[in-house]
Image (cartoon, grey):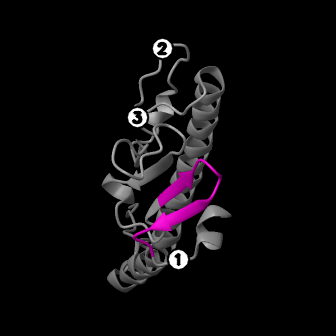
């Protein structure tokens, strides 16, 4: 008689609970290290995009001033097409705004401007805060914990 031999418990392959838990712990540790690095990498990319948008908008302001003799007092200027970056950076992580003082004793009526890229949504807690750029090319930051050099050059 041919008897079928059942496999012994030693020859059955699989994972034990201990092996599974060790694997889960290793994945957890790697995730805890990788996720903050990835988040900072994404924020740094959005900061670069905001800086580029500020510089592009400043160039638009200079072209408008060349055409009319003064900087536009608002984001509407007929002879030139307003860049899309003046209203919103594409990633929706920053909003670009323009300030051009008007009226009052210290009024410059279109001789100066300050552009600001304010973080929003996922970028709101960024360490660099809001980027600023003036008509003279002075780069600055507001609401930040970093230096201007660290944020504008990285």
x, y percent for residue 108 = 47, 44
Relative image position of residue 84 (x, y in whole percent): 48, 28
Answer yes or no: is residue 103 visible. Answer: yes
Give the residue pinned by disc 3. 87
**For the point 53% across and 70% down, which residue is it?**
37
Is residue 22 located in the magenta-colored stretch of the structure?
A: no
At x 60%, y 60%, the residue is 139
Q: Magenta stretch containing residue 139, yes or no? A: yes
Look at the picture and state if 51 lies above or below 4.
above
Q: Relative to the observer, which residue lies in front, 56 or 4?
A: 56
Residue 105: x, y in percent?
Answer: 37, 51
- Residue 78, label in figure: 2
Residues tagged 3 and 2 counted as in contact (Cβ below 8 A): no
Q: Residue at x 45, y 51 (%)?
A: 116
Per the model, the C-alpha gap separating discs 3 and 2 is: 16 Å
N-terminal label among 3 and 1: 3
Question: What kind of element bears circle 2?
Answer: loop
Q: State the residue at coordinates (36%, 81%).
A: 21
Q: Is residue 48 left or right of residue 94?
A: right
Q: Which numbered disc flags the more N-terminal residue, 3 or 2? A: 2
Q: Assign the N terminus to one quadrant of the image.
A: bottom left
Q: Nearer the viewer, mark 3 or mark 2?
A: 2
Q: Residue furthest top?
A: 79
Query: Crowdedness of circle 1 by 10 Å Cα count: few (<14), some, many (20+)?
Result: some
Q: Quadrant of residue 55?
A: top right
What span is colored magenta in the figure? Answer: 131-144
Q: Is residue 90 above or below residue 30?
A: above
Which of the 4 quarters of the picture holds residue 69? top right
Q: Which residue is mark 1?
A: 146
């Amino acid at each position: 008689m041919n008897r079928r031999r059942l496999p012994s418990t030693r020859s059955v392959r699989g994972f034990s609970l201990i092996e599974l838990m060790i694997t889960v712990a290793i994945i957890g540790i790697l995730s805890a290290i990788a996720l903050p690095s990835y988040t900072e990498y994404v924020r740094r990319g959005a900061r670069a995009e905001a800086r580029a948008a500020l510089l592009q908008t400043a160039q638009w302001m200079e072209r408008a001033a060349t055409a009319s003799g003064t900087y536009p007092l608002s984001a509407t200027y007929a002879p030139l097409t307003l860049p899309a970056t003046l209203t919103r950076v594409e990633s929706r992580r920053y909003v670009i705004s323009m300030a051009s003082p008007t009226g009052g004793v210290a009024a410059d009526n279109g001789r100066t401007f300050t552009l600001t890229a304010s973080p929003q949504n996922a970028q709101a807690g960024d360490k660099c805060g809001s980027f600023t750029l003036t008509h003279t090319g002075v780069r600055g930051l507001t609401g930040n914990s970093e230096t201007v050099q660290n944020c504008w050059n990285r």
